[in-house]
Each structure stands twice: as C-alpha cells, then as structure tokens.
Image (cartoon, rainbow, N blue to C red):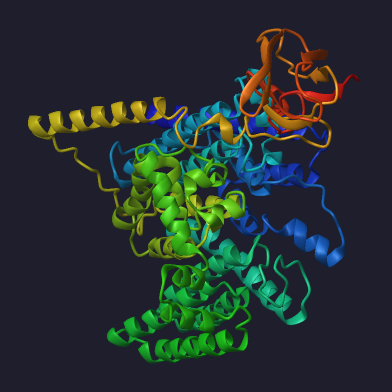
Amino acid sequence: MTKVIKLHFFASTIFLISCFIIQVSLNAHNALPWLNVVLFLGILISTVVHPLYGIGILVFLLPFTAGVFHQTQALFNIAIPMADSLSLDCVIGVLFGLFILYVFTKRLKIDRNTDWDQARILELLLIAFHLVIIITVAIAISRNLYQSVSPYSVKGFLYNLANIRYLSFHDDYFPLRDLVIFTAAITLSIRLLNLIRTPSQLKQSLLIPLAIATTIILGYALWSKLTGLGYNRDGVALGVNSFLPDIHAYGGFALAAVMGGLYYLSSTNVLIKWIAGAFSLLAVAGVVVSASRFAIVMLGIVVISYLFFVLRTKNRGKLTTVFLGFILVLGTAYLSIHWDNRGLFSRLYSVLQSQSFEDFNTALSQRPEIFRSNLLMYSHYPIVGLGKGIFYRQSSIAEFSKSDFFATYNGENAHNYFLQILVETGLVGFVVFCSLFLCQGLYLRNRSTEIITVLIVGLFSGNIYGHSLLIPNLLFLLFILIGSSNVDEQPEKSISPTIRLIPLPKAWCYFLIAMTTALVVGAIYEVKTSYGKLPFQSQFFCYKPAEYSDHQTSGLFKETYTVTGNYLMLNYIVHHADAQRRPLTIDFNLEQEGQRIAYDQRLIDSPGEYQERLNISQLKTGSNISLQIKTSRCFTPINLGVSLDKRPLGIQLNKVLQDTR
C-alpha cells in the first residue's frame, strides 16, 4: 500500500509541475503571469524551509486568490499581471516543495508506520476518487470530441493543457481543467494526512491562518457595504462579494465562518468565548451583506438551532453563551430586515402563496426546475455520469436538459454541488465522494478535529442551493480540511487504532465480486453506447448550421438563393490542418421544394483555396434553391494546436456567385 501512495505522490506532483511550467512558458498569449510565478516560488521556498510554514501561508492566501485581481483594480486601478487559477499555482508550489524535501533531503516521510487505520482508509478513498476523476474526464473529452466531430491529436491535447486557464465551459478539452485541479487537491489532501498530526500543528498551520484570512474578508465585505468601494459584481446596493467571485460564493463562505465561530462559542475559556462571539457577530453581518437569500435563511436556522441546543445542555459558562447567542439571533434579525435589498421576506411569503409549479419555481429562483433537470440528465447515464467537467456544455442542449433556464443561459451549473457530482460522475463518483466525508466525520473526528467537521458542514451548507465549490480556492480549502483530520489528541501517548480486516464468508465474497463485475460491465456498456445518443450527437455542435463574420461556416452550411444564372459558383478555403493525414470529404447539395437538383462530393487532401460549380441551368429564373454544404468533420483550431480559436469550423465560404443568362 505504501508503494501505491508513493507512486501516486510522485506521478501527480511531476504531472502538476509539468503543467505549471508549460502553462507559464508556452501559453498562446506569450505573457508571463508574474503574480502566479511569484506566489509559486514564495510558497515553494517557504515549504522547503518548513512544510507547516508553507501550508499555513497557503491556507491564509487561498480565500483571497479568487478576487484579488478585481479588488485591486477597483480600489487602486492596478491591473496585476496574473493568470486564472492563482490558487492552483499556490497548491502546486506546496506540493513541489514537499517533493523536493522527500527526494533530495529525505526530511519528509510519505509512509506511516501503521498498515491499516482510519487515515489509511481515507487515503484509499482519496485515490479511488482521483481514479474516478481521471476516468470521467477521459470519457468527457471523448464525448465532446464526438459531438464536435473533431479528431484526437496529441499536439492538440498538449496545446489545450498549456492553455487550460483560457478554456471556457463549452470547449472540448475543458475537462482537463478539472483533472488538474482535482489532482492538486487530492494529492495535497493525502500529504496532509501525514504532515498535520498534533493539535498544535492543526492550529498553527490551518486554524489560525484561516481565522485571520476570514476576519479580513468579512471585515472588508462590511467596509465595502458601508462605503460602496471595491468590486461588487452585482452592485453594492444589491449585495457584496468581498474577495469571492459572487454573492452566493461569499455568502456560503461567511456561513461556514458563522458555524466555526459558534463552535468556539461553547468554549470554557472566557477569553476564547468572547473572541468567538465577536467573530460570530462579524460573520453574521458578513452573511447578511452578501444578500444571498439561501445563505441568510440557513444563517437563521443555524443560529436558532445553536441557541436551542445550548439551552438544552448543562455546560459551565452557559449563561454567557446564551447571552451571546441571543445577541447573534437579534443581530441576524435586525440586519436581515435593515439590508433586505433582494426581497428575502417577500420571496419567502410568495413561496407560501404558490399555487402552481411555475409560481413555486419562480419564488425559489428556478431551483425546482434546475434540480428536476439535474435528475433527468442523471437518469440517462446513472453509473458513471456525463463525464467530469461537461455539465455546462450538455445542459445547454434544451432537448436534453428539458429546462428553459439552462437553454436561456446557454448552460449553467447544477446550483447544488452534490447534484453536479452525481450528474457528472454518476453513482460511482457520488458514492466515493460522499464516503470521503463520512469517513472523516465518523472515524477521524475527535475533540481536536471536531472543528474540521463543523467547517466542512459549513462549506457544504453553502452548496446545497449554490455552487461555491466550483471555485478552485474553496475546493482546495475543502480538501485541506479533509487532509487535516488525522490529528491525535495526545500523540505522545496514543497509538493510532488499527483496523483488522475481517474475512468475509465465501458467499459474500462471491456476491461482491458479482456486483463489482456487473457494475464494471454496466459502466462499459453505458459509455460505449452513449456515442450518438442524446446529448452526444454532432447536430448540436459540429453540424449546427452557422456562418461567422469572417465567412467561416460550421460543419453544416445552409442558405437559400434566388436563381439568376446557369451555374452557382462557390469560392472557398479549406483550413483543416490535418487534411493531408485525414482527407476531408465535402458534400454539396442543391434542393428545390424538397427535391435534389444537384449533388457533388469533393475529396480534399490538403488545405487551400478551391472552387465548385453547380449546374442550375434547368431551373426557372426567379425560383428559390437551397444550398447545403456538409463536411465530413469539423476543424476546431484549438483541438489541433493551431490557435485559440474554439469554433467547430467547416470551410471559409468567401463567394457564392451566379453567371448571367
């Protein structure tokens, strides 16, 4: 088992550092993202000096990385030269530092003394989830390429890998982004299981840096609300987002901060209790100024539930806790009424007054429709899902999602992270993902790591109605919390409990083997038969008729012309860079009133300019004809490593002329 852990660490770290190098030096924009490089090197050096210092700096910086560019530009009019996914470079810096320590100094241990304990089970689950991510990303890319009728290319794969920071949700290789991010998150989480082992290490490398960063973010949000300064995507009058991309992500983050503060509010230490009370009140204000309606509703539920729990217990210092709890309840109520800029209470009233699904759907911001569509899409591919990273793209297909919301916005996220995992990775991925947190909460939770469980639940609470875990820095923070769960309360006295593997009866062994075999066969069949089925059909991408301003067409061109001459003459350019290796077939078809008038097929074996001449002399002057041009495949420049042009293209149709009769 130790060899598997080592191999996973080496392979993942080498892959990630290779990605960082090519993304920084070989990207299509030929621009060096200075901030990314500086943070990478700074965290790398800190980790080499002392691993826990590097992790502490990483935890402090992560919450800021998603919004630092927009905030500095809004406040100081300074555009920092940086690339997307700043948090990813910080995590890679830590991992590379740990890699250097192990390979060159032997100061870092990868393996642990025990063969089977709770942490070993969590390591296995993390590796299993990583394997699910790798498989579903491969499935997703192959299905995207099938939709785009775009051939696989090693050069194109590497080009997309070098430019994943510039890919958008609808691009064929966008799932590579998820592969890199989850590889970094999972690898770091596994490493932390062996690095953070004592309560003092947990506080110094995780809890204190996170508390300081959160206080700054919450304070900045309140300051931004009161002054109107800073970047707020939806406008400060509607809600603030601080250093997060939107109000819902920030509201969910602040909600987790509230839950963390309430945990320490029950401390027997008076000083800690009052500090926790002040922090909780700041976090309550932070949730309210976000104006995220679900976060505010969850805030009320959390605070009232906590007060009810305290009133039922008989702990020392209960009076102070109850007093602070009442202040939080009153503060929540007052601030929610005072800053109700998005009509929370009127929206709640409209929910109660709903008399139809449409009314209920509107009152709950289309969530019922979205969740229904999620389950409908999942039902098509229940075992291994659509493929990791393609929810946006496939949900944009109205025939598949059956959702006006998704069709209107050209695809969106699931607005519930658990449902998104279910739809993209199927039942297999969903079960493994949930098992990670069940293992942490049931087997690794003790007095020192209870706060970890609370913070994880807090992050999840913001993702029931939202999607903040789609933001890399919060996803990294979630997996750091998982990795920090292997803490012994008294390491000098305690020995990690081992798990004895109880041999199962033969009947159960045969049953499990049969179930696993059936699951594997079912998954293979599900994937193999998906190509050509809804939504993985070329009509939605390559053969969706389109003509662009530069005269490029999609793989299918349709247009109607009026007959004025004897010949319809076409002048076009074929840009397919791989035409010599894969000859391109172009079908030219002329129809009139549903009847084929002329047809020609041309085989192209090299890029260049071509002409086509179609006989229409037999047609009556002034009558209409329909021209259809269809290529045997589409040319997507980014998929062949030519440029960042992401359009699935057919030909460049420069001229369509007729002679005179």
Q: Tell me which corner region of the image, top left, top right, bottom left or bottom right, holds residue 219.
A: bottom right
Residue 325 locus on image (x, y percent)? 44, 86
359 left or right, relative to 500: right
Q: Is 573 rendered above or below residue 648?
A: above
Q: Nearer the viewer, residue 646 or 157?
A: 646
Q: Nearer the viewer, residue 661 or 228?
A: 661
Q: Nearer the viewer, residue 90 or 236?
A: 236
Quadrant for the N terminus in the image: top left
Judged from this view, the residue extending furthest toward the front is: 620
Residue 443 locus on image (x, y percent)? 29, 53
Q: Residue at x 36, y 50 (%)?
A: 434
Residue 437 locus on image (x, y percent)? 37, 53
Q: Is 449 rendered above or below residue 611?
A: below
Q: Residue at x 34, y 30 (%)?
A: 523
Q: Is 95 rendered above or below residue 206?
A: above
Residue 407 locus on image (x, y percent)? 57, 51
Q: Tell me which corner region of the image, top left, top right, bottom left or bottom right, holds residue 528.
A: top left
Q: Tell me which corner region of the image, top left, top right, bottom left or bottom right, holds residue 154.
A: top right
The answer to whether one can see residue 104 in this image is: no
Q: Residue at x 60, y 44 (%)?
A: 91
